[in-house]
Image (cartoon, coloured by chain):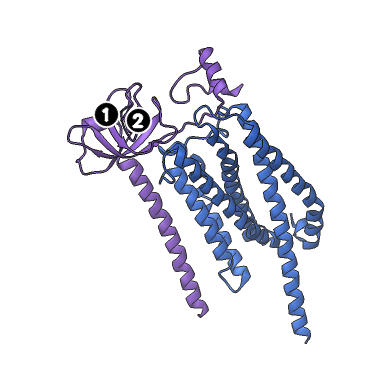
Amino acid sequence: MHRFANPARFTRLADRVLPFVAAGALVCLGIGLYLALFVAPPDYQQGESVRIMYVHVPSAWMAMFVYVAIAVASAVALVWRHPLADLAAKASAPIGAGFAFLTLATGSLWGRPMWGTWWEWDGRLTSMLILFFLYLGHIALMNAFEDQQRGYRAAAVLALVGVINIPIIKFSVDWWSTLHQPASVLRLDGPTIHPSMLWPLLITALGFKLYYLALVLLRIKSELIAARLRALDLAKLKAT
Amino acid sequence: MTRKHRRLYILVAALLVFGGAAALVLAALDENLDHFRSPSQLIAEPPPLDRGIRLGGLVEEGTVQRSEDGLSVVFRVTDLSESVAVAYTGILPDLFREGQGVVTTGNLQSDGTFAAREVLAKHDENYMPREVVDALKASGQWHDGEGGHSEGMTQ
């Protein structure tokens, strides 16, 4: 793992991978959204409003995936002091917060006509809102200290404590009687969503994942360049 | 601002965030579990009339009556053993229909009916086009109710 701790090596690798990841994201999102908005059939109960699901569900998956990625990076940073792990966590947090916000916003827009309410304090919705707050707390904590390393450490601890929320989100619909429906795709007895709707969803979800990957590589790269600039400034200051 | 102050503020802010989060969860659980009744429970133990409660169940088939101006609606909510008449004025959610699961918030009236301030329709985990539903119904594989038709989906 320490092979990629070398910033120069990471940057070379990222430069090589980035065009493919970005192109993949663009293609998957293009095809996925076209299928979702124009090809997929309206739902037998929800009608056309079901199309919100093609953005809502991938956002929700990514909001949870990015948080787990941050937690893993935080553990690596705390235990092995891997310098790129802190940067990966820092680069991921605003993206994850964006996904969580998108989940809450699209869910609200769907909930008003379908359920009859913008918001309900139910287990799934509340735990998702807490995830959004955890992201905001993580971003704030990262930047709360003058000493960057202390910010990294505090944020890493928060990320690890908060990871308990992820299974709560996933299983909230099974544990409590929620207004939110149970899982339709990731369930033991197979998906309860028709293939004509499942495929657009999976392609869009892949697009979301590649989009995150492209963005996070770009952001880590720019963090590395910023750190290099700071080091150069410091060296110049010492020389004068 | 000294560093010590700064740390203190951060600690207080973190505590507030966590406290707030915990309070939200507790409030959510309290609201959803404590005041939730099925029609049978409502009839067996009628709550005080001034206490807001949530009544959940299925909209009984053939009981939905809309007023002439289309604003008010009366229907019965059933748990398949007992049922309660519910009156509601306002816009119903798109998913509201006979046989659908609903959660209504409101008060029990002295005549035994339930005056709802809010009607929420529950959605299940099944997503499919209308033609598939028609096909399933035609071949007799369609079962109304919870999760009964998941086998038809996996193929």
Mark 2 = which residue? B57
Q: Outermost residue toward the bottom?
A: A240
Name chain A's colour. Answer: blue
Q: Is residue A97 above or below residue A59?
A: below
Q: Measuring from the top left, give residue A103's x and y in whole percent.
A: 54, 46
Of callouts 1 and 2, which one flags the residue occurring earlier in the amino acid sequence?
A: 2
The chain shown in purple is which? B
Compared across the picture, whether B119 is left or right of B130 comes to left
Q: Is residue A154 visible?
A: no
Q: Does the CB distance between marks 1 and 2 fall below 8 Å?
A: yes
Q: Residue at x 57, y 34 (%)?
A: A186
- Tag 1: Cα neighbours inside 10 Å, few (<14), some, or many (≥20)? many
Q: Is residue A13 left or right of residue B94?
A: right
Residue under numbered circle 1: B84
Residue at x 65%, y 61% (from the top left corner): A86
Image position, residue B128 (x, y; %): 56, 27
Q: Position of residue A75 (x, y in %)?
A: 61, 56
What secondary structure is marked by label 2? Answer: strand
Q: Nearer the viewer, residue B152 or A171?
A: B152
Which chain does the residue under circle 2 lie in?
Answer: B
